């Protein structure tokens, strides 16, 4: 049972354009969400997070949007840069458990 | 800050041998450490959660006698894959939490190949 899903396994975007990565979840107990960037043979690197009390969080080129009613979140990267090319994972957790449930990942390729 | 290291980064072993992977939090004390496994082109699957000084809690389907976890100090957790078989070949990643709200810091991972 995949509680966190990323339905797009890959995405290609031109440099300078916006990248939008999507994530859906099923467990209504999740109240904190995170996005990680991962290169092959490396551990995930934290990008940005959002609490369920918010619907938007912004950090530089990265913005995460949360739609609780739809159980959907998205990561916007603008402008996209070739160095953003990596696999992006969303993760969800319930406060106090410290357990992250990861999505299946989306491979982003930013074309120069 | 918040650096987590793993050693070794890559290990190749023969079938039937045991392999130990270390996870260290370098600049903070980790009350909780986590072990994940990632199959090729798949998500990170949580294997177990360990708290310093107590037994690890394993996720459903993870054999605790096969994947021995020790969290002997606030900066070190070890995962031992016992009697390794080729199907244990995978990328193992640890993370550490200082106990503050929802934070986990990930190590760089260990690539295990069992021949």
Image (cartoon, rainbow, N blue to C red):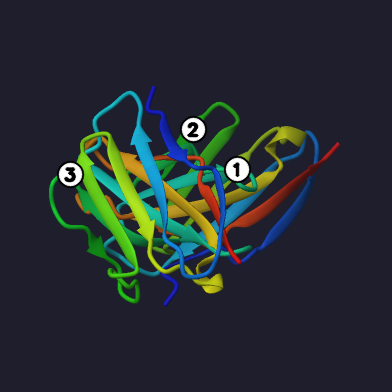
List the residue tagged with mark 1.
A76
Category of crowding for the residue at label 3, using alpha-carbon neighbours closer than 10 angstroms: few (below 14), some (14–19), many (at least 20): some
Q: Is residue B107 left or right of residue A78?
A: left
Residue at the location (47% across, 37% down)?
Answer: A48
Q: Residue drawn at (78%, 33%), measured in percent from left and top?
A: A16
Foreground tag (2 vs 3)? 3
Residue on which the image places disc 2? A58
- Whole-angstrom CA distance, mark 1 to mark 3, is 37 Å
| Element carrying mark 2 | strand
Give the mark nearer the N terminus: 1 vs 2: 2
The relative height of residue A25 versus residue A42 in the rendered view (above or below) is below
Measured as percent of width and height from the top left, residue B10 is found at 57, 47
Say whether residue A94 is visible: no
For disc 3, the marked residue is: B52
Bin the neighbour count of mark 1 within 10 Å (Cα to Cα): few under 14, some 14-19, many 20 and up.
some
Q: Which mark is residue A28?
A: none
Where residue A111 sits in the image (x, y, percent)?
83, 42
Q: Position of residue A76 (x, y in %)?
A: 60, 43
Nearest the camera: B29 or A60?
A: B29
Residue A3 percent location from the top left of the image? 41, 69
The residue positioned 37% from the left and 41% from the top of the image is B23
Front-most of A102 and B56? B56
Tell me which corner region of the image, top left, top right, bottom left or bottom right, holds residue A86: top right
User: In the rendered image, which quarter contains the N terminus of chain B?
Assistant: top left
Q: Nearer the viewer, mark 1 or mark 3?
A: 3
Q: Are marks 1 and 3 on the same chain?
A: no
Chain of the residue where label 1 is placed in the rendered structure:
A
């Amino acid at each position: 049972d995949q509680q966190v899903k990323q339905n797009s396994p890959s995405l290609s975007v031109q440099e300078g354009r916006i990248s939008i990565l999507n994530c859906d979840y099923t467990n209504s107990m999740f109240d904190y969400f995170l996005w990680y960037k991962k290169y092959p043979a490396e551990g995930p690197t934290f990008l940005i997070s959002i609490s369920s009390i918010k619907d938007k969080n912004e950090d530089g080129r990265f913005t995460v949007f949360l739609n609780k009613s739809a159980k959907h979140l998205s990561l916007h990267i603008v402008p996209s840069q070739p160095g953003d090319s990596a696999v992006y994972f969303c993760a969800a957790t319930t406060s106090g458990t410290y357990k992250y449930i990861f999505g299946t990942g989306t491979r982003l390729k930013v074309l120069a | 800050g918040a650096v987590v290291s793993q050693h070794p980064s890559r290990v190749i072993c023969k079938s039937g041998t045991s392999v130990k992977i270390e996870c260290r939090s370098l600049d903070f004390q980790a009350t909780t450490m986590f072990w994940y496994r990632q199959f090729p082109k798949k998500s990170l699957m949580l294997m177990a959660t360990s708290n310093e000084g107590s037994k690890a809690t394993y996720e459903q389907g993870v054999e605790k006698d096969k994947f021995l976890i020790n969290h002997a100090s606030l900066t070190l957790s070890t995962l031992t894959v016992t009697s390794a078989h080729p199907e244990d070949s995978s990328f193992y990643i640890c993370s550490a939490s200082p106990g503050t709200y929802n934070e986990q810091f990930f190590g760089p991972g260990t690539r295990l190949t069992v021949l």
